[in-house]
Image: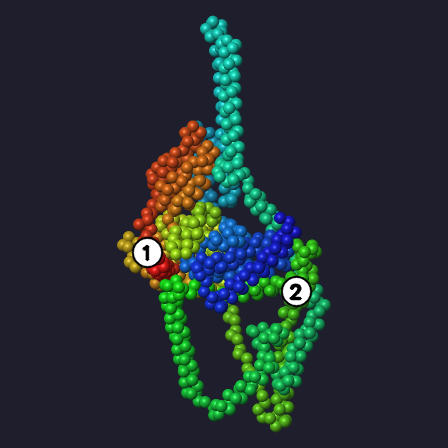
Amino acid sequence: MSNVTYYEQWLKIKEQMQIAILEDERLQELASAFVGIKPQGTAVEIVARVYCKFCDLYNKLCECYDQMEQVQRRPFIKKIIDALTCRILELKTTLEEVELFEFTYPDNALQQLLMVPQDIRILCPFHYPYEIRQKEMQYIIDQIFAGNRIGDPTPTASEIERREQERLEEEERIRLEKEAEMKRKLAMGEEIVLSDSESLHLSPEELEELKLQQEYNEHILNIQRMERSKYTIRERTHTFNKDRDLYLELAGLKAPQASEELRTRAASFIQKIYRRFMELKREHVTMNMQKEKLDMIIPSWVPPSAKEKLKKVKETRREFRNKYYENWLAENLKENSRVVRLREGDVMEDISAEIRQWFREWYDEVRLFDEFPFPEEGGSILIVTGETFTIEEYIEWRTEEEKRLKSEGAQKSKEQIKAEKLAAREEEKRLKLEAKLKEEKRLLDYKKARLNPDNDPGIYITIGTNISQVHEAWDKYQNQWKDTDTRDPPLDVIRGYISKLITENAYQDLQLKLRPVVDELMRLELNMLKNSLKLDYQAAGIAKPPQSKKRNKPKKIKVSKPDKVPPAAMFQALVDEGIIRKYEHITLDDYWGDTNYAAADTRAVLWTPSFPPACLGDVKEQVRLRCLLTLGSSCPNAVRSQLLVGPKGSGKKTLIYAIATETNSILIDLSPMNVYDKFPGPKNLKTMFAYVNRISRLMQPTIIFVDNADKIFCKKVPKEEKMFDPKRLQRDFFKEIIKPLIPSEDKILILGTATEPWLAKNGQMYKVFPSLILLPRTDYGSISYILTKILMKYHGMNREFNVHCVAQVLRGYDINSIRKAIDKLMNGKRVAELYYKPLKPEEIINAVLDFEDVVYTGEADYDMYKEWYESYSPWGKKYLDYMQMLESQLAYKLKADKKKK
């Protein structure tokens, strides 16, 4: 799209944003007024409408932020995105509480808003992986992963000499081996081929490119050989038939030709059959084309999609945007230097005049001077913004202080003050306990009231705390750009930068730069004024002049100490030990699965709702919100540790690698089977934790991966695993990894997997992983979707192959085994036979059943995961209470209906 199109889209986003904020305010009014909403389906729709609108806006804002070439507007959009992220996560939590399930289905709200599920599918923004990590850290990662040991300490002179000697000895050894090999070939009479390829030193990327080129050349040569062979065979056959006909004719053995009438009839018959065949073929092709357009079938060859072309266009726009950004930075530097040169003295005078006016106001009104704000608080900026003690507040405080002193009389002793503080603390504890008991009683009464449909108060919506951030970010943008965003703006509003704003920002930066200097001068001047005022009071016979309220000095911000070990050395050490490692680069699109389309309707049934299990596609959406969105957010209450629980082969590692790929995160593997022999000893273990903590923050985004996390917290270690000491990290994991996390600053995610979670201690594991995602068994819909995607890529495959019967049989089998089994089945020979020997469903079933590493999870096996989930997750207890409430309400209703009859 063009710059004008993106600008028009931005104006539409502004209108949608205002509508969404107004609807969210109405939702907050319902929550603040404690309005009970019933039935439950209505409450779900009310919350889901706001949630869907914000998700749609989030995706559009991310696209604008990525593609907009107006560089001065982008920081404001980024702040709106950050605020919106926190609100979306909060609305998701509210939706879960209203629906009483972790997996939510806002399908009914989507129908009302005329939207589709793809509109609210949270996409990983482009700026996540590329604008969070510093360039210096990315350089260290790239170099060490490429094999360059930049993290090693600088070698000494003797070490360099030793390495050089080893290199020369190695070269001499190789030379002698080559000479010996050449002498052997001369003695045996073998051909000696001299090649310089052995002396070439290629990078891994060049070797990979050379390998692909060689493979491509081999395919070309194979095709050429096949074509030459076909041509030769055709010519030889033609010559043989010609010679044979000539021989039979000369020998008088050639059969006479058929009559003219018979040949004409035969030709007509062949033409008739051929025409009918071509007619049927054209009808078949036309029907297939119509079905392809309607997405009823999937073609084997897909042309380059518009999506790929759009990616290239977006990449080009990013290059233009970066050029505009560089020009904007250069213009900023130029304008800042100009403003400093011309207006430095004037700005200092203006700041001094503002502060002196503040001194004068206090002296004229109350004949004293207020305390000057400390530099740690912001200095005189608080005076300008009106965040200091006002004169009216001072008069009120002084009156209350005089009353207090009169009522107290004599000065209290230290023991009395200590006793009062102790009594105040005890009173505070008592009030907290009363509030807690009151809340517990309210919840108990609420649960009891819900058991009877006549007394059911309905669903109460939680009051949101992050809506103020959205308002603040939106108002900040509106104040700056309200007059600039017009229907017919100048060119610099659409792309590039606005020179006027650069000048305004230059003045603002100069003010911020000079204000601390002026503040120090004004503090000296204030001390002089206070001393003079004190002398005036003494001259008037007032020994104790009035004082203003003293300001509490803020704590000094601790300056972080420089690292004793440089980041490159720490990263190199973790890579050498295998704790930081490369991972398979896959995306969430590679995790195939379908969503549950019937859940929204079945759950909304009034008296007898049903709750179908989640599907693989629902898990993917949960991962987008809880992992992708959370990792890039700055929300103070975001949960940054997730436990993926599911049967073996359910795709837990695939999801973790996809999250790491989508966010360009480094992967720190703290799995018990990976670190049991790394950094041995308590002291070295502490060093490992220190390295992990430091590197995860310096090189964020970071994913700390704990495979088989249940083994760390297992109740009893099996005999065969005692040598690996899986409980080695149990004592220090929470203290060293989870506790230091600052959700509002750190872009770190702790992801664990568990295959047998019931063998672990729930309390300790819940402390580390308070949130979990339970992966379901492979369902009919997901297997049908996967079989269709796999099989339809083969050209000779019947486009209407019945995958549904196969999906019914393969429910419970892991997806990875199904894919590998089909790939093994569809070898070159079987693909070539598809035209005359179509694939049968039983072939796929037998291939999966005969596959060596296939994993099957039955319903009885999966019930163990459900039972554990109900005991581990808070949602398990909520689900049981909800089912009890539904049964009670249904019983009351049936009883009332029976009385009416």
Q: Secondary structure at mark 1?
A: helix
* Furthest residue toward bottom: 541
- Whether residue 326 is visible, yes or no, is no
Q: Is residue 110 above or below residue 185?
A: below
Position of residue 893 measured from the top left corner of the image (x, y, whole percent): 36, 59
Q: Earlier in the sequence, mark 2 or mark 1?
A: 2
- Of 406 and 759, nearer the camera is 406
Place residue 526 in its image quadrant.
bottom right
Q: Is residue 265 left or right of residue 727?
A: right
- 416 horizontally vs 276: left or right: left
Say few, some or many: other residues with alpha carbon within 10 Å of mark 1 (under 14 / 14 to 19 / 20 or more). few
What residue would you read off at disc 2? 505
Please state the horizontal and vertical placement of residue 576, each as a whole percent of the image. 43, 53
Residue 751 lies, in percent from the top left, at 42, 56
User: Where residue 63 is drawn, which disc sits there?
Assistant: none
The dot on residue 867 is: 1
Q: Are marks 2 and 1 in contact (CB under 8 Å)?
A: no
Q: Residue at x 33, y 51 (%)?
A: 862
From what the image shows, is residue 20 above or below residue 391?
Answer: above
Residue 100's image quarter?
bottom left
Label 2 crowd (10 A; few <14 / some 14-19 / many >=20) = some
Amino acid found under the numbered disc labelled 2: Asn
Residue 704 sits above or below residue 850 on the image: below
Q: Along the line of sight, which residue is nearer the eye, 582 or 827?
A: 827
Give the amino acid at mark 1: Glu
Quadrant where the C terminus is found in the figure: bottom left
Name the residue rendered at 36%, 63% in the picture: 451
**Residue 542 horizontal side relative to residue 32, left or right:** right
- Seen in the picture, residue 759 relative to 397 is either above or below; the reply is above
- Give the image location of residue 781, x and y in percent: 41, 45
Q: How many marks?
A: 2
- Nearest the viewer among 295 and 578 is 295
